Amino acid sequence: MKRFEILSKRMLNDNITWLVISAPLVARKAKPGQFIILRTDEYGERIPLTMAGHDSKKGTIDLIYAAVGRTTMLMDQLEVGDCFADIVGPLGKPTEMEGLKKVCVVGGGTGNALAYPLAKGMHDAGIEVDMITGFKNKDLVILQDEFKAGTDNLYLVTDDGTAGEKMFTTVKLEELIAAGNDYDEIVAVGPPIMMKFTCEIAQKHGIKSIASLTAYMIDGTGMCGGCRCNIGGEDKFVCVDGPDFDGSLVDWDELIQRSAYYSDQEKYDREHVCRLTGGVRYND
């Protein structure tokens, strides 16, 4: 087994992939909520990805990602037996679970891939977990079997009603709270706008909220400042202070604005492919 070798590759849908990678040193120290930074090759950019799982005995880590930018599109071109240039981690603070008895985890879209290790980690720690998974339509639904095995109650909702119930995750959350569920904490993982409204609902009902944030970053140690965010009026860094933050303290408007900085470049990468290989270009 080679270092950072891809041991298995599973397509969850047309856009989301699950990789199992050999990374013994990372797997030995990893905890739910932490992430890694990787490069596909020596010329590649460094991107952060939350670990979807790890096995310290086998020395493996799991990554679930959506092909939305240059590097993740390049990752889709890798196959079992290929190796990443480097993987650094585990980074970030693990998800805090002490004192929790019952939580609701709310995942939106591809954020469900990040919500999975959090929900499972809490469930494995003996915490009662209600999981709300939200998607636009049935073609985008992922990880339902895994969530069923790793939570106490699973609720599937879609915007168009083609799978599960037709409603938004926030509506389902309001239903569960109204039904008398006494949550110690509500965890939001997904698009910033969804997390914003989820945390506002939690605050309205006097429930603590946690937002698991993602951000652009280079080094993962607080040096580059690319993942800076405003938490309670103070500058914090997702890489070292997070990725989990008190949802009631996040400056959501600033976060939403920053999250769109590179959307034009990501769109360009998706639309401009190599005419010889049909794959993403390494360099322009």
Image (tube, rainbow, N blue to C red):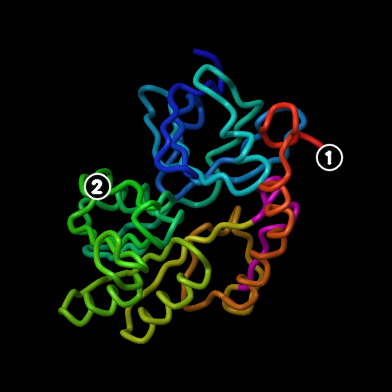
Left or right? Give the position of 17 relative to 206.
right
272 versus 198 height, above or below: above
Mark 2 → mark 1, Cα distance in angstroms: 43 Å
Image x and y of residue 76, in percent: 56, 34
Q: Residue at x 31, y 85 (%)?
A: 205
Q: Secondary structure at mark 2?
A: helix
Residue type of the residue flagged with mark 1: Asp
> 109 or 47: which is nearer to us?
109
> Considering the numbered disc 1 on the image, is that residue within a helix, a strand or a loop?
loop
Q: Which residue is situated farthest in the top direction here?
A: 1
Which residue occupies the foreground of this view, 260 or 269? 269
Instruction: Point out the frontmost of discs 2 and 1.
Output: 1
**Image disc number at residue 150:** 2
* Mark 2, other Cα within 10 Å: few <14 / some 14–19 / many ≥20: many
**Magenta stretch, overall SS:** loop
Mark 1 burial class by Cα count in 10 Å: few <14, some 14-19, many 20+: few
Counting from the top left corner in percent of width and height, residue 266 is at 68, 52
Q: For residue 232, what is the image quadrant?
A: bottom right
Please, what is the three-letter code of the amino acid marked with disc 2? Gly
Q: Sequence-wise, which precedes: disc 2 or disc 1?
A: 2
Q: Residue furthest left?
A: 180
Residue 284 tag number: 1
Q: Which residues are magenta?
A: 216-230
- Residue 210 spot, x, y in % from top left: 42, 67
- Residue at 37% over, 65% down: 187
Which part of the image, by quadrant, shows the C terminus?
A: top right
Reply yes or no: does residue 222 show up in magenta. Answer: yes
List the single residue furthest toward the front: 275
User: Residue 5 placed where, x, y %?
Assistant: 53, 21
Q: Are marks 2 and 1 in contact (CB under 8 Å)?
A: no
